[in-house]
Image: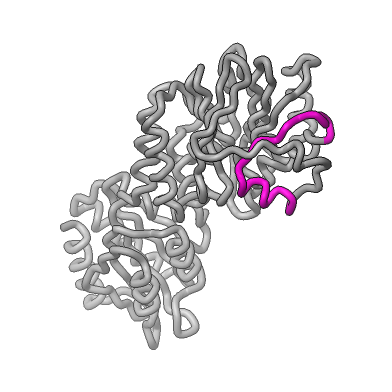
Amino acid sequence: MKDTSISNDIIYIGADDKTIDLFESQYVVPNGISYNSYLIKDEKNVVMDTIDKRKTDEWLENLEKALSGEKLDYLVVSHLEPDHAYNVDVLAKKFPDMKIVGNNKTFAFMTQFFDIENLEERKVVVSEGEELNIGKHTLQFFMAPMVHWPEVMVTYEKLEKIVFSADGFGKFGTLDTDEDWACEARRYYFNICGKYGIQVQSLLKKLNTLDIKMICPLHGPILKDNLEYYINKYDIWSSYKPEDEGIFIAYASIHGNTAEAVQKLAKRLENEGAKKVSIADLSRDDMAEAIEDAFRYDKMILAASTYDAGVFTPMERFLNELQSKNYQNRKVGLIENGTWAPLAANVMKEKLNKMKDITICEPVVTIKTKLTETSENQMNSLVEEMLK
């Protein structure tokens, strides 16, 4: 059962989307996604962000019910991405006297999305630390550029000590999905915000100066208890530190021989005392989850077939994704396979050398079609090295 209660004056008006297949047209969301939006009722009524067009009708019904016939004075736009801002124009037309609150970058981009009548007269431009008093409640704005667009800002409500955190602290899954927060929040973080660890660290420093009782993100559940847990996770993730001790094995196998070698490798690692071994078949498993596990564990082994004098396509894509998400500070082992000219390791090394603080372990295991005594010995040596 979802809990959307916030306070007497702050009402949840968002919606769950259980019919979406791919978030941002690329991330599998088996349990859907929530689009969160909030109404603050006071002398001046304020909506904190709109939602995606997929749920416009439900959102408008929720808003009208919560307003109970009162007017709407302000819309705060934390983030202009369409899953949150699609209905800015809808709301502007519905409430022609409503002011729109954003920062300079918000309004620089807004005209690319909407043609809002009298926007110059209606906009309220806020900067770092500036406040907006609406009665009992006061909203204070903090810029969060590149978490994960340039115009992003978060809002701190000073009376009830609530942070409206934009995409920060969000997760995949609808609000009525009963699942562990960290798993889907981690997959969400590294794939949506993973590139911008420095910027997330900057935001965390700002949040550490505030007395926070609740965090209201734009996706996922409202966070009310044990906030230190969630903030600590974000600190670990955004500083690119391993979260757990373990070895993640990602493989790309064409005909199954590389996959068979990986299964033997995993058993040896476990038998020799590896604390955790996680495996992903890059040809079939969710790429976003593979990215998540690569960042989660302190060590990784890549195993791939040679393909077109390079590396098999799923591994190439995975390495490109890792580089784009700022993968760093890890120990990595390599296994290559090739019937006549094994070249995959060279390509993998070249990609990894472009990443920060990556230690490539020796030996590189070279398989020619299938495991032999020579390649098994190399694998045993790699196991020793990975477990040091």
Which residue is depicted at the point 31% across and 69% down? 334
Q: Position of residue 90 (x, y in %)?
A: 80, 37
Would residue 261 be found to the left or right of residue 174 on screen?
left
Would residue 246 be found to the left or right of residue 39 on screen?
left
| Outermost top residue | 8
User: Is-magenta flag for residue 290?
Assistant: no
> In the picture, residue 209 is in which quadrant?
top left
> In the picture, residue 138 is in which quadrant?
top right
Q: Position of residue 338 (x, y in %)?
A: 39, 81
Q: Position of residue 164 (x, y in %)?
A: 54, 31
* Segment tinted magenta in the rendering: 93-112
Which quadrant, please, contains the C terminus? bottom left
Which residue is depicted at the point 77% across and 42% down? 119
Asked if residue 221 shows in the view, the reply is no
Asked if residue 193 shows in the view, the reply is yes
Which residue is depicted at the point 73% across and 54% down? 112
Snapshot colouring? one colour
Would residue 209 be found to the left or right of residue 101 on screen?
left
In this rendering, the answer to whether 183 lies above or below 268 is above
| Outermost front residue | 121
In this rendering, the answer to whether 177 lies above or below 297 is above
Q: Position of residue 279 (x, y in %)?
A: 39, 55
Which quadrant, please, contains the N terminus? top right
In this rendering, the answer to whether 5 lies above or below 163 is above
Which residue is more in the foreground, 56 or 245?
A: 56
Which residue is depicted at the point 25% across and 66% down? 359
In this rendering, the answer to whether 194 lies above or below 161 is below
User: Is-magenta flag for residue 94?
Assistant: yes
